[in-house]
Amino acid sequence: MNAFAGPDGFTSGFPVDTRIVPPVKRVQLVTIRQLALLTAKQRVLWVALAFVFVAALALLRIAIIGLGDHALTTTPFDEALLPPRGEIVDRNGAPLARAFPAYSLWFNPDAMGEGEVALVKPAAEVARRLKAIFPDIDEKRLARQLAAGKGGYLRRRVLPEEANRVLAIGELALEMPEELDRHYPQGAMGAHVLGYVGADGHGRIGMEQVLDARLRDRAMLTTPAELSIDLRVQGALEDELYKGMRAVNAVGAAGIVLDVDSGEVLALASLPSFDPNRISEANVQYMFNRVTNQVYELGSTFKPLTVAAAMDAGTVRDMGRRYSARPFPMDGFTIKDSHDLGDSLNVPEMLIHSSNVVTAHVVQDLGADRLRKVMADLGMNQRAQIELPARGFPLWANGEWPLLRAMTVGYGHGIAVTPLHLASAYAAMVNGGIWRPATMYKVAPGTEARGHRVFKASTSARMRQLLRTITLYGTGRNADAPGYRVGGKTGSAEKPGAGGYRKTSLVATFAAAFPMDRPRYVVIAMLDEPQGTVASSFQRTAAWNVAPIVGRLVPRIGPMLGVFPDARRDVDISDLVAVIPEAQKAATASDQ
């Protein structure tokens, strides 16, 4: 340590450190800091690149799943989550049939070892305790089964809380295996459309049977089977049919709502019905489908079809032309009306008052062969065309028709078809003349079946006028829903029996379409053996019991289907009204 010498040669007297830091060490320190910063940046870069790589892989995976077949990319874990049977939904995606896990109650007499006692408690006591859990069970029959040691199912579809109560009984022989169950969330609604699934896992009747292979296909389980049915319309149809059936003590009822342009079935009901969730011997008798499988003589609902055939052939041109309305003999049979309708009627009056006699004269001018051909073109000589498996074959006379046969067919006797046959025929009559098969599948716009022409477009336009006239002035007045421009025809036919027709048993039908200025839907409602009650003014004919059903149904379903009431619109029927006398318009028409 030396004193510092200033420029003047004197020392300052302060100590001075004569050691100096070498410049090389300073440079090394700066270099180390730069290297550390560079290393940190490189690490951040590698982490960022790793994130980008992972994100790219994820996006690639999403693209592959989105563009490829998802069924082919499911993992074993995905497979375990798939239901054993595909879902069925209505046209709006509402569930109609699903698969759910459920418990069953199984009696295993060997649960405590072969040769050992099956039950700890007496069979009668176990049966009594099971009866307390399941009130609808047959206690005596169950006790006999338990006492006999006969194994098997005691009950299907056991709820979790019920399973806990069964476990509390403390019998090892009462086992509850978990199974996958088919569930119908709407209960009995649409039962004849859906059908049910049997114990073997295969569909029975209805679309469960038709779609069985598709619903069991593992590659299709994630895609619901979409039907044409509209659940809202189905509910309204069943409700109105049930009320109408009970009001007149009918033994059964049937109904259908059909899109006139696509052939889609929006609703189909056969009553009494059954609950596909609870299949038993008691409700098997109700599985018969009255809409597609039962054939009926549908009476006067055939008269508009006959008139349309005559118009197309050119034998009916003048709506004012009058025909004799007096009974006349034909091949040993007298053709007559239920009551005196006067000396003569024109075609509009004939439809308003439903005259058999005038219809027979129209057929006489048309000819049996031409009427037979039109009926065949409408599919009346073959099974109803629809996907449902239960399809009845019409009672159709083969070979050439004699004139008497053609006359009776003209007013709906001597031929028996299903209500679905009638619905498809009316759709062709009002949609411009094109017949198409009905379908239970939802149809995309522009993909409907091609069909074939039966009536000229001009004939279809005239028939829309005539059907509207019937609901305004004739037997269909009780079906007229204000603002919805309903048109249609009644039909009340005696049911055939041993030795001839049964005077006391009728099939009452109303065939309608709406709105008649631009028809979109056909509605068929039918009652089997209605009785005269207070609700029908003690009348049994369709004008009093079935027409009101349609009159209540149309305002319920119209807004659901995009058809709203409009009192300012209607079909122009002024030229038809001109040929109907005022007395005829005001008269209360009876029904054939």
Image: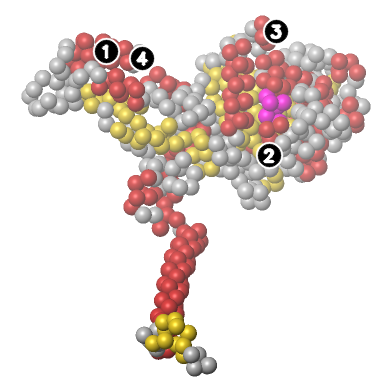
Disc 1 residue type (three-letter): Arg
Task: Measure how far apart labels 3 and 1 are at the Cα level.
Answer: 52 Å
What's the CA distance linking mark 2 and mark 4? 45 Å
Q: Position of residue 509 (x, y in %)?
A: 65, 23
Q: Secondary structure at mark 2?
A: loop
Q: Is residue 316 magenta?
A: no
Tag 4 residue: 136
Q: Residues within 10 Å of mark 3 (few under 14, many from 20)?
A: few
Measure how far apart labels 4 and 1 are at the Cα level. 13 Å
* Whether residue 375 is situated above or below residue 325 in the rendered picture: below
Q: From what the image shows, is residue 423 above or below residue 35?
A: above
Q: Which residue is mark 2?
A: 260
Q: Residue at x 15, y 27 (%)?
A: 111
Element at label 1: helix
Dot 4 or dot 1: first in sequence order is 1
According to the image, label 1 marks what residue? 129
What scheme was used to colour the molecule? secondary structure
Above or below — where is 371 with respect to 14? above
Q: Type of residue at label 2?
A: Val
Which residue is more in the foreground, 78 or 530? 78
Say whether marks 2 and 4 touch (CB < 8 Å).
no
Left or right: 304, with 389 as reference point: right
Determine which quarter of the picture holds residue 250.
top right
Question: Which numbered disc, 3 or 4, marks the residue that appears first in the sequence?
Answer: 4
